[in-house]
């Protein structure tokens, strides 16, 4: 087969990999919010609970919202969890031109449903999963951490030969496919600008969430294994919830290291992992800030009155991402008791950046902005300014709900990371 044919096949494979959240379109997102307000109103009576008037009322409301989102969208989280650090290795004391120290941690996470405890798997025959950690060299005080889940395996994300690479690495992703993904979805879809991040004083923790495979049959099988002891198949957790859970298990380990400021750990994710970054923060109060870039359906964008990807589209293409109950709601979204503004409200008053692109209508930037508007009353109730911009393109990184809209389509491009760091500087350094 000729090289052009190989390149074409790799291009088609990359498009297929991200097509669930990245269908190309010539449409443009509106710059002003358009469509009905998010329902139910976030401070109104909910699930038998009276209307919210005080911050303490809201704290009492949060478990009800979590239960409803688990039942209708994400599936049930474990009853309890635990994390062990199995190993820590220094891979490179002078990584990225001497700017950083590269380490590799092996973690083991246990999910407990009922009386059954199940441990994550890394590679065949091994328990646990890998966390790659890059810390600024010679930092004089504990550093904030950007904790990210990535599409590409860690040996592609971090260009250092010391990073662990299993024997079946080609089957697990990376290689030429990683290069094609970078061409199609932007220069930072696989590898973030480590030098830029380190120079701004942040550490980076990279989690390739292959402990829950992102394939239909393999993913569903592993989700069933990890939730052994949970009987209701309709509300069994999906991969998005499990990936969010993995964020929290990484935080368990990171907060034990004195070099890391455990009160300044931000979750970062693009597309499906943007959904997981939001879920992690909504269920784990230790997350200090969130960067959820183009998280779309099942993430920041409303289920009702939406453009682009529908509930039926996403659950049909990716049945392992959510609870079966979410798929059952396709076409009947008006009957749901929840919508995605409630997910954002659970994060309040902590800062969240919702990243979008104007031609990425499949991810529904307008629906994400209306969800931010719907969550804003909780931020204000808790003493935060929340969403302060009136339009999608009025970038305000110092707002607790910051909405980033750039030109272009789905991906992580050169304009994105300077905006992400501007937001994190405003929220975590001041």
Image (tube, helix red, strand yellow):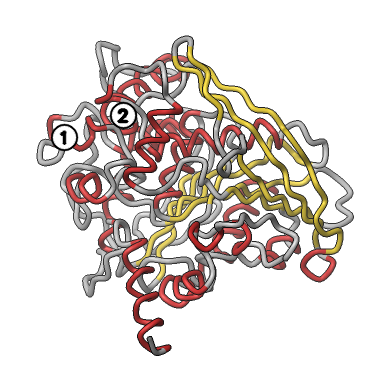
Q: CA distance from mark 1 to mark 2?
A: 20 Å
Work out whether 303 lies above or below 16.
above
Mark 1 — residue?
329
- The picture places residue 129, in percent across and down from the top left corner, at 61, 41
Give me the disc on residue 42. Answer: 2
Work out whether 254 lies above or below 419.
above
- The picture places residue 179, in percent across and down from the top left corner, at 51, 75
Pair 1/2: label in front = 1
Residue at the (60%, 60%) spot, across then down: 422
Evaluate if marks 1 and 2 touch, with contact meaning CB atoms under 8 Å apart: no
- In terms of secondary structure, where does tag 1 sit? loop
Asked which quadrant contains residue 196, the reply is: bottom right
Residue at the (38%, 86%) spot, across then down: 1
Q: For mark 1, does the 10 Å Cα neighbourhood hold few (<14), some (14 to 19), or many (20 or more) residues?
A: some
Give me the disc on residue 220. Answer: none
In-front residue for pair 424/119: 119
Residue at the (18%, 50%) spot, across then down: 35
Q: How many marks?
A: 2
């Amino acid at each position: 087969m000729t090289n052009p044919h190989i390149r074409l096949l790799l291009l088609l494979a990359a498009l297929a990999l991200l097509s669930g959240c990245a269908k190309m379109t010539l449409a443009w997102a509106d710059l002003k919010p358009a469509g009905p307000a998010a329902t139910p109103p976030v401070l109104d009576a909910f699930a038998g609970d009276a209307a919210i008037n005080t911050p303490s009322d809201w704290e009492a409301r949060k478990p009800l919202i979590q239960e409803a989102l688990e039942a209708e969208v994400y599936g049930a989280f474990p009853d309890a969890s635990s994390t062990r650090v199995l190993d820590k290795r220094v891979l490179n004391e002078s990584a990225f031109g001497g700017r950083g120290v590269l380490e590799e941690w092996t973690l083991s996470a246990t999910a407990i449903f009922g009386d059954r405890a199940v441990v994550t798997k890394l590679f065949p025959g091994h328990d646990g999963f890998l966390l790659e950690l890059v810390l600024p060299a010679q930092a004089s005080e504990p550093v904030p951490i950007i904790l990210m889940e990535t599409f590409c395996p860690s040996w592609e994300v971090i260009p250092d030969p010391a990073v662990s690479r299993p024997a079946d690495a080609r089957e697990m992703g990376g290689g030429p496919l990683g290069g094609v993904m970078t061409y199609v979805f932007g220069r930072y879809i696989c590898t973030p600008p480590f030098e830029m991040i380190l120079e701004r004083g942040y550490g980076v923790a990279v989690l390739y969430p292959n402990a829950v495979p992102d394939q239909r049959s393999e993913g569903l099988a592993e989700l069933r294994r990890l939730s052994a002891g949970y009987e209701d198949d309709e509300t069994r957790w999906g991969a998005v919830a499990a990936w969010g859970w993995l964020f929290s298990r990484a935080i368990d380990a990171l907060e034990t290291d004195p070099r890391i400021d455990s009160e300044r750990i931000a979750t970062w994710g693009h597309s499906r992992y943007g959904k997981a970054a939001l879920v992690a923060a909504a269920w784990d109060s230790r997350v200090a800030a969130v960067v959820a870039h183009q998280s779309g359906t099942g993430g920041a964008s409303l289920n009702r009155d939406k453009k682009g990807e529908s509930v039926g589209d996403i659950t049909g293409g990716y049945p392992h991402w959510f609870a079966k109950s979410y798929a059952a709601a396709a076409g009947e979204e008006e009957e749901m008791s929840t919508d995605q503004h409630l997910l954002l409200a659970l994060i309040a008053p902590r800062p969240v950046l919702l990243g979008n692109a104007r031609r990425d209508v499949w991810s529904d930037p307008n629906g994400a902005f209306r969800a931010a508007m719907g969550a804003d009353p909780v931020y204000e109730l808790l003493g935060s300014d929340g969403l302060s911009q009136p339009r999608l393109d009025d970038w305000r990184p110092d707002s607790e709900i910051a909405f980033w809209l750039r030109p272009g389509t789905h991906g992580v491009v050169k304009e994105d990371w300077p905006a992400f760091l501007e937001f994190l500087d405003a929220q975590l350094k001041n």
